Amino acid sequence: MDRYFLKLSWKNIWRNRRRTLLTINAIGFGVMALVALYNYYDGFHDQVIQNVIRYQSGHLLVTAPDYHKRMATQLFMKDPSEVDTWLSSREEVKAFSHRVMVQGLVSTAQGSANIVFAGIEPEREKDVTRFSGNLIQGTYFNDDTEKPIVLGSELANLLQASLGSKVVALTQGVDGSIGNELFYVSGIFETHSDFDKNMAFVHINDARQLLSLGSQASHQLAVVLKNEEGLESVQQSFVSKFGSGPNLPFQILNWKEVQKPLMAMIELNQSANRLLMFIIIFVAALGIANSILMSILERTREFGVMLAIGTTKKEVVKMVVMETVLLSLVGVALGNVLGFLVTEFFHHYGFDLAWLSSQKLVVQGTIIQTISYPEIRWNNSLLVSLIVLVLSLVVSFIPIKHVSRLNPVNALRAL
Amino acid sequence: MILSFDQVSKQYSELETAIRQVSFEIEEGEFTALAGPSGSGKSTILNLAAGLDFPTSGTVTLLGQDLRALDKIGLSHLRCNQVGFVFQSYNLFPVLTALENVEYPLALKGVPPKERRKLAEKALEEAGCGTLGKRLPSELSGGQQQRVAIARAIVTTPKIVFADEPTANLDSKTAKMLLEVFKDLNTNKNITFLFSSHDPLVLETAERIIQVADGKVHEDPSNKQQPFIKGLGFRTPPQSLRSTLSYYHS
């Protein structure tokens, strides 16, 4: 079989132009939809992950053992300064910041709420998370306000607090004492997420004081890397340096370990997408099989002639397979080109799924933007294309079975 | 001897026997016609002779090989390399040009493209349609299509060509011209021809006629005719065949 048969197969698939075009369009549309959808979802998942990394955990989170599971204020790192020194020496590390997390009551004369006070190092935190960019009023710990506190917008509304308002924080210290402190509102932030109603930022030293913690203590040390590819090596080096175990002072977790529910949601989403992919591709493949089968049934007599003049059944089957592959390839090529164009379009203009639901999409307390800017991912195109080709070959067993059963004498008599 | 049937029978069912106890031999270079009305068993004999079908009993030997002893691939190779086919309704591949149609058997044999093209052009010339190479079958008349089909049949220089009612769809003038092509190839290239036909023109041209009726062959040794001599036209059939021919003419 040489180029002659490739040419013959190519000409054969265009015998019934309308049917072939319909089949190619069906494959092309399916491939386009899948490629574009996969690119969209990948972009969307990346956005969710980046949101969670840049608003919460960072790439890596150093805590006292079990802190992440129990979130108990008593589980703090007494003196993580040696971790600071080690992190400063690592090239992969872009920034890191300590946090003291306090659960307590915040109140004004007009109201009160149970919230989380995040005690942060304002300058360092700016490089780790994006909260500083979400300020809608006031300043981010850089005015002369004594005991500043930055409230979420909904919380400020609840407490009827504005810039300069006094708020009282009340909590139980790690030594069992009741800690309370008077803060002054220096800023109000808005993230359009649950953080807006249940979170307030204070200076880390004020939080330490509130909890009666030592001057170096912290609950979390969030680390952001220059490049996510360095994640495993930094984590492994940390474990080699500081060990791992319940009795050691530190534990390091990567964002995937911290955000297990999020990862589970993404995996579930990806599984649903894979199922959708198989359904769409299977339908497209059946279209190919139907098109090839129709074309073969119309050519029964021609196959009889082929067999009579010395073509083996194997060669006839090869030709049918070649026709199937060519038809699929044209459809796949068309689908990929369209998928590329659709992805490029939405890469520039964004694709918003908000019209599908009136509810806000909240993941791990973070509201996820429904608008996504998908990017071309060649692995998606390759995966979808390969599966279309393989499934097309699998379903082509129907026409192949018909051809392999042909009796040349009967085939020659066919109309 | 190029083809022999030895006590060959073909039974499709208990009620339907296509041919019974048929025996005959064809020598190399013969120009033979199987004559008989529709349903007499002519096509069955051609199918059996080409190994497209198998006898219920008896032996068919083609080019010294018992066809039963060959497997399907062996039969395909034999047909591809040594046998040519011409069909009643031409059966060209409609998506291929005349030249590409003629190239088909050579492509099957794995002949390189350049040589394939040269041989196909030569075969088209020999079949009298050298100028039609680029046309699609749909752009050709019935006679032109049959010439292309002849070119396809002879392009591999087969030992024998089986032609099943090759002139049935053609007018007498075209049929006569085609028979001249067949005869030329028979004379000049020593290709053996076995026709099945009830066209009087074919029967007049044939050197030898094997009568098939009700699945049996009847051959009068006296109906071996004088060879066809190009330019002298068709010779008068022997006395023994005149009644048959007049039946078809009527």
Image (cartoon, rainbow, N blue to C red):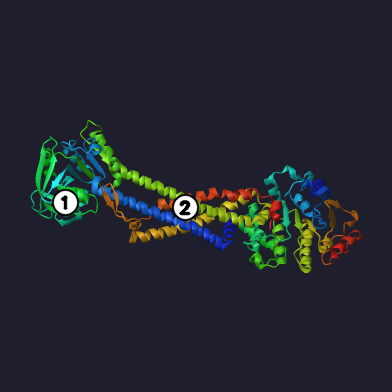
| Image disc number at residue A280 | 2
Q: Which residue is mark 1?
A: A151
Q: Is residue A46 visible?
A: yes
Q: Please name the amino acid that badge 2 sits on.
A: Ile
Question: How much space separates mark 2 and mark 1, taking CA atoms?
Answer: 48 Å
Give percent across and percent down for residue A250: 22, 35
Residue sitting nearer the eye, B77 or A79: A79
What chain letter is assigned to the residue under label 1? A
On screen, residue A313 versus residue A49, left or right, reads right
Quarter of the C terminus of chain B within the rendering: bottom right
- Residue B110 drawn at (x, y percent): 63, 52
Q: Residue furthest front?
A: A110
| Front-most of residues A368 and B186 | A368
Crowd class of label 1 (few under 14; some 14 to 19; many from 20; radius 10 Å): many
For the view shown, which residue lies furthest in the top direction? A247
Name the residue type under label 1. Answer: Leu
Helix, strand or loop status at disc 1 = strand
**Nearest to the observer: residue A159 or residue A223:** A159
Crowding around mark 2 (Cα neighbors within 10 Å: few <14, some 14 to 19, many 20+) is some
From this viewpoint, which residue is outermost toward the bottom? Answer: B173
Identity of the residue drawn at 50% across and 48% down: A390
* Mark identifier at residue A296: none
Q: Is A233 on the left-hand or right-hand side of A208? A: right
Mark toward the viewer: 2 or 1: 1
Q: Is residue A377 visible?
A: no
